[in-house]
Image (spheres, grey):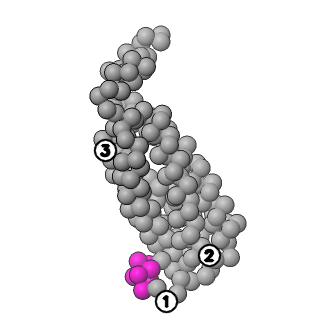
């Protein structure tokens, strides 16, 4: 049975990597969702009604409330940090230069967090202004905001950030 599973994994290596990426993403997403709920409903609860004032950029982006903005930002940082470590070590078994990988990852994450902060705060403002800001709706919105970046994060992590050098590829192949 073990040989059949190993053969199946070997035959479908890329699918297996995406499955591991998905499970890693789910694990770190649970962490991010828990952090978000904590910040949204405990730490910044009083700021969910506090408008962002005197900031033309945030006003232009449709971000109106500080609590949503801070909660999305901090929870995203926590989730992406855990994701980097788990994907580097477990999913892709990368051995590329960790400094370069970290710099590229940070650039990707800065873009992604900026997107998530804008998109999440925009949707949070929208659902609040429409009167749909219940816990379930807010958490479903957070989940949607977290899933969208997979469109660019998987290809970048798989083929750019968490590469395997040729020296390690043979060893990793033998380990699987």
Q: Which mark is residue 160?
A: 3
Q: Earlier in the sequence, mark 1 or mark 2?
A: 2
Q: CA distance from mark 1 to mark 2?
A: 17 Å
Residue found at x 70% / y 66%: 42
Residue identified by numbered label 1: 54
Whether 165 is drawn above or below 40: the answer is: above
Question: In the picture provided, is 28 more to the left or to the right than 104?
Answer: right
Residue 32 location, x and y as percent?
57, 53
Q: Earlier in the sequence, mark 3 or mark 2?
A: 2
Residue in the foreground of this view, choosing between 55 and 2: 55
Residue found at x 42% / y 12%: 4
Q: CA distance from mark 3 to mark 2?
A: 38 Å
Foreground label between 1 and 2: 1
Residue in the foreground of this view, choosing between 166 and 71: 166
Are the residues flagged by discs 1 and 3 in contact, CB closer than 8 Å?
no
Q: Main secondary structure of the magenta part?
A: helix
Residue identified by numbered label 2: 48
Residue found at x 53% / y 64%: 72
Residue 86 location, x and y as percent?
50, 40
Residue 149 visible within the image: no
């Amino acid at each position: 049975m073990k040989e059949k599973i190993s053969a199946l994994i070997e035959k479908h290596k890329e699918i297996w990597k995406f499955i591991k990426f998905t499970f890693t993403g789910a694990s770190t997403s649970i962490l991010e969702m828990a952090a978000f709920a904590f910040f949204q409903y405990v730490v910044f609860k009083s700021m969910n009604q506090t408008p962002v004032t005197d900031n033309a950029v945030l006003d232009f982006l449709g971000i109106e409330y500080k609590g949503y903005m801070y909660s999305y930002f901090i929870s995203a940082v926590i989730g992406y940090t855990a994701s980097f470590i788990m994907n580097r070590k477990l999913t892709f078994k990368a051995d590329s230069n960790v400094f370069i990988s970290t710099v590229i990852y940070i650039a990707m994450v800065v873009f992604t967090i900026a997107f998530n902060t804008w998109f999440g705060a925009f949707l949070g403002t929208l659902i609040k202004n429409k009167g749909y800001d219940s816990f379930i709706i807010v958490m479903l919105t957070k989940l949607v905001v977290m899933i969208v970046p997979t469109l660019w994060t998987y290809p970048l992590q798989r083929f750019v950030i968490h590469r395997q050098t040729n020296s390690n590829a043979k060893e990793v192949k033998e380990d699987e």
